[in-house]
Image (tube, coloured by chain):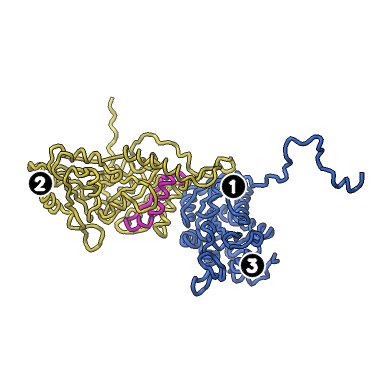
Chain colours: A blue, B yellow
Amino acid sequence: MTAADKRSLPVLDIAAPPSQAAHLVGDFRPELLRSSEHDLCPGCGEPVAMRLALEVVQELGCAQRAICSVGIGCYTNFTLTMDVDSVQCLHGRAPSVATGIKRMRPESLCFTLQGDGDMVNEGLQEVVHAAARGERITCIMLNNGVFGETGGHMTATTVLGQRTKSSLEGRDAGYHGHPILIADLLAPLGGAAYVARGSVYNAAAITATKRMLRHAFQAQLDGRGFSFVEILTMCPTGWFIPVEQGPQYLHEVLGAVHGVGVLRDGDQLRTTRELLAEPRKGSR
Amino acid sequence: MTSIAPAPRRQLMAGSEAIVAAAVEAGCRFFAGYPMTPFTEVLEAFARRLPPVGGVCINAESEIEAVGMAWGALATGARAATGSTGQGLSLMMESFSEIARAELPLVVINMARGQYDYTQATRGGGHGDYRHLVLAPIDVDEAVDLVPLAFDLADRWRNPVQIYGDYLLAHTVQSVAVAPRAFPPLPAKDWAVDGSLGGTGRARNINSLGLVRDLKGIRPQELWTRLQAKWDRMAAEEIRFEAEHTADAELVVVAFGSLAKFARYVVRQLRAEGRAVGYFRPITLWPFPKVELGRAAGGCRRIAVLEQNAGQMVEDVLLSVLGRVETVSIGGISTDNSGFGVGDLLNADEVRRRIEGALP
């Protein structure tokens, strides 16, 4: 038998074929997700962010006391498969619902799952007031700079120049106004204990974001006050770009305005402007 | 052997204070509200009475946040309420309709500015098909009966219930007895979230969209159809009303809430004078006692609707008699310059003048 023949030999003995096809992919879903199937678009960053939150809940040993208040957006779909008690809220209202839950069940780990449209457009005052009150809840905002569920419309976090279905030539400061850096708004408030902005554009950013979520949940568990993690996520559908360009676009377009880092940890405060002035880690 | 229960202690209390005392006695442990006349004293009383019993009262930053907080508290299985006056309730409407679809037992304490929010209370301003039970006490005494009933009905039907009061109810000081009430046992709140089922494959989800675990997408057709059947049953089973002297009446006066107390007083006076006048009061504004009113007033010559607004409940009265009995409005807009609904119509002589004017 020549070397070439050896290379072309089948791995399995064809004379005795296996009874079922080989499993090429293992089941890597987090324990708190009943199914890894979802209806979101290819290239969407939200499932990655969702996964991180569920993994951290599990790792902190809080699986049996976590309650999630879910807003309205593509991520609302996760309530069908996440194995965590959840309450679906009206668009923008999740921080108030989480407040009611936490006040009645102080022993629970309460977090919200909202998008930028949900939190910064429709429900801005809810999250600001919850943070100022120092509610012992953790708000998680998935920021892709568009209304993904309606098909790519401008939100309050859409960056200048970004093209959406309602800012066709790109967001113009004079015509459409400026984006709101929500984390900067929340960080200085008296009740805020931990405020950070992460991203899921590459593996290093994902790991850093998971660390932020752990800090945020821990701040709640320690009773230190309100905590907030904004996570930049890809939305190639809403950005009208090919799926494979999503991570780069996220990093270079949204990430250039909504800079990644920790804005508040206890008494330590930093602004996005300061974060962006630091040398960027993990840039391509 | 007879056992005599000690008579509940009567206390002088303003209506809002008594309503809150009754709510706390009924097990309400969470309240969130935003101050607004004439509802403000309800918020004040909850802020005083909830913390000592381990409850929470939040002075919310807006009505929209208040109802959202109550939503969360209800989701944990707690008895919770919010409230306001009509203006504030306008802001809460989106949540009211969704809470009805999420089947959460919200109690809403509405201290309206007079009776001009009848249509708002009974029809609501929220989106989609939804219904709230609406209980309209005639005075403070009845209010302390209806408040525990509201919490019971909310839990029984898993549906919002509104108490419709007004400035007069909120601010009248009366001697009342707030005592525990007995109701038939309620089903366990096995739907309430406490986090305990996380990771077991059976985590709970409370939603208003028709999301069903492990099934893809939303299922509005199934949810809305099931809820409509529930609201049909509520409409049939929860009607409450009060009627006097209708059997041989030539004129039946229909009124609700505070104004009904004036109407009932005048009708009793006229009866004592030998006039053929009757009185009918819906206690549930929704469901409106249509069949019952049709039956009670079916033999009279005229129905006079006395309400403190431009003519809102009269539409329900017309639907009750469907043209079989002549129906006239004898109420109208009546307010002082505060706009809080305290007007000249809240006067027995004026009510008598209007009822006499409607006699056939």
Q: What is the x, y in percent for residue B35?
A: 35, 58
* Chain containing mark 3: A
How far apart marks 3 and 1 lie (CA) works out to 35 Å
Magenta span: B75-104
Query: Is residue A97 part of the magenta span, yes or no?
Result: no
Secondary structure at numbered mark 3: helix
Mark 3 on the same chain as mark 1:
yes
Residues marked 2 and 1 touching at CB (< 8 Å): no
**Viewer-nearest of labels 2 and 1?**
2
Q: Amino acid at mark 1?
A: Cys
**Any mark on residue B360, and which?**
2
Which residue was labeled with disc 3?
A: A252
Query: Is residue B103 part of the magenta span, yes or no?
Result: yes
Q: Is residue A270 left or right of residue B33?
A: right
Residue A278 visible from this viewpoint: yes
Residue A265 visible from this viewpoint: no
Name, please, the residue furthest toward the bottom.
A174
Residue nearest the viewer, comparing B20 with A46: A46
Residue at 63 percent of width and 45 percent of height: A31
Q: Amino acid at mark 2?
A: Pro
Q: Place residue B334 in its image quadrant.
A: bottom left
Q: What is the x, y in percent for residue A234?
A: 61, 60
**Any mark on residue A62, and which?**
1
